[in-house]
Image (cartoon, rainbow, N blue to C red):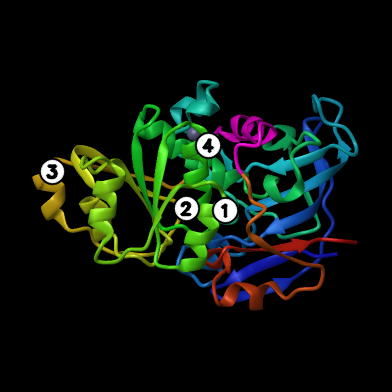
């Protein structure tokens, strides 16, 4: 039995314990697979602050082993995805019975205990049933796809517009595929040849290296107009200053996903071009929409390498950051 607890910075210990349902609206779920995320690595290293003790792990799926009598649509054996973001229960929206409009959402592994453990007891509304056609690996990507979808919504784009995606690792690749699903044309930029090659394999036509020729390539790809928006994947190693150079006047730059970076943006282009800059790091209430997208094959993750581990030392795995930047998904398979 596993129950990994972060007791302080880089102090992760396994303290097995027993959990039981205490209300008719709770489910008990056996965690089966957990994807190590950048957020887990940043929490482990102390670059994202939390209060201790705290169980890390935010991208996980499992199987219901017990359901209270008021858990609608859940029964023993239901395969589920754990919501990594929950409504706070404290703000005005939450107290008025509108948790979907919560202004102060809380996040797994940071504000409440995550899923790096054998069993989780939670409200049945904190897990989402998974259709058979959504496989385990795609289900582990739901939050990344949800953030991509949230970014797409924020940008208010129309079909055929060109959008620069700076950074083509795990999250950048998924974001580009989500844009493509919505008939927006992604222009992916990365300095890693493997990431560019993977983007091509996923059907992304414009995938460029961030070299001296970049601006000309962008001009060619946009009939001389530059891009209609740009998204900087915050975990990318590329300079954020590239981003504002790739878009035209009055456009929007999104800083997306999770990072502990404090890189500054150059204000020159932002002022001169009258740009809007916005950040998107979470996606509350997107899970059902994303599961529906996956049923329709919106995102293909077959080109990411997957390391599925049944024996592991999570502290060791998290100490150097994850391999998501190299397009490798490290998945803990939690068996009895
Ligand atoms: Zn709230």
Camera-nearest label, 1 or 4: 1
Q: CA distance from mark 4 to mark 2?
A: 19 Å
Is residue 205 or residue 125 the one in the foreground?
A: 205
Sequence-first disc among 4 and 2: 2
Circle 1 residues within 10 Å: few <14, some 14–19, many ≥20: few
Q: Looking at the picture, does residue 146 appear above or below residue 317?
A: above
Q: Which residue is mark 1?
A: 201
Residue at image coords 48%, 42%:
148
**Which of 335 and 23 lies nearest the eye of the viewer?**
335
Question: Mark 4 sits on what residue?
Answer: 284
> From mark 4 to mark 3, how far is it between C-alphas?
31 Å
Pair 4/3: label in front: 3
Circle 1 sits in a helix, a strand or a loop, which is it? helix
Q: Which residue is mark 2?
A: 172
The residue tagged 3 is 273
Q: Position of residue 207 (x, y in %)?
A: 42, 54
- Is the shortest distance between ligand 1 and the CB of mark 4 under 8 Å? no
Residue nearest the viewer, comparing 173 with 80? 173
Q: Earlier in the sequence, mark 1 or mark 2?
A: 2
Secondary structure beneath label 4: loop
Label 2's element?
helix
Are the residues tagged 4 and 3 within 8 Å (C-beta)? Answer: no
Q: Are marks 1 and 2 in contact (CB under 8 Å)?
A: no
Q: Give the residues drawn in magenta, as a range.
A: 285-299
Coordinates of residue 334 in the picture (x, y in percent) = 81, 61
Going 40% across and 28% down the picture, which residue do you hit?
159
The answer to whether marks 1 and 4 mark residues whose Cβ atoms lie closer than 8 Å is no
Q: Quadrant of the C terminus?
A: bottom right
User: What residue do we see at 19% from left, 41% from top?
Assistant: 248
CA separation in Å, label 2 and label 3: 25 Å
| Residue count near mark 4 (Cα–Cα under 10 Å), binned few <14, some 14–19, many ≥20 | many
């Amino acid at each position: 039995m596993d129950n990994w607890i972060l007791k302080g910075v880089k102090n992760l210990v396994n303290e097995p314990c027993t959990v039981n349902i205490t209300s008719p609206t709770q489910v008990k779920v056996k965690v089966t697979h957990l994807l190590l995320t950048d957020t887990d690595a940043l929490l482990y290293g102390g670059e994202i602050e939390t209060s201790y003790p705290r169980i890390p792990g935010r991208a996980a799926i499992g199987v219901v082993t017990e359901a209270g009598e008021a858990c609608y649509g859940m029964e023993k054996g239901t395969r589920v995805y754990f919501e990594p973001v929950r409504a706070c229960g404290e703000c005005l929206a939450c107290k008025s019975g509108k948790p979907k409009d919560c202004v102060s959402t809380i996040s797994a592994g940071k504000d409440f205990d995550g899923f790096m453990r054998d069993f989780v007891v939670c409200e049945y509304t904190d897990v989402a049933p998974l259709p058979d056609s959504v496989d385990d690996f795609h289900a582990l990507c739901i939050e990344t796809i949800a953030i991509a979808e949230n970014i797409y919504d924020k940008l208010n784009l129309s079909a055929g517009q060109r959008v620069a995606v700076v950074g083509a690792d795990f999250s950048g690749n998924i974001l580009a595929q989500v844009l493509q699903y919505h008939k927006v044309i992604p222009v992916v930029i990365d300095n890693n040849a493997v990431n560019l090659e993977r983007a091509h394999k996923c059907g992304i036509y414009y995938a460029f290296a961030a070299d001296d020729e970049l601006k000309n390539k962008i001009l060619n790809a946009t009939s001389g107009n530059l891009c209609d928006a740009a998204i900087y994947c915050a975990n990318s190693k590329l300079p954020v200053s590239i981003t504002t150079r790739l878009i035209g006047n009055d456009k929007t730059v999104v800083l997306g996903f999770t990072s502990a970076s404090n890189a500054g943006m150059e204000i020159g282009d932002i002022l001169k071009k009258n740009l809007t800059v916005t950040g998107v790091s979470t996606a509350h209430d997107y899970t059902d929409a994303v599961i529906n997208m996956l049923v329709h094959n919106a995102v293909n993750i077959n080109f990411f390498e997957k390391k599925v581990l049944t024996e592991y030392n999570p502290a060791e795995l998290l100490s150097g950051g994850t391999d998501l930047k190299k397009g490798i998904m490290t998945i803990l398979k939690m068996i009895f």
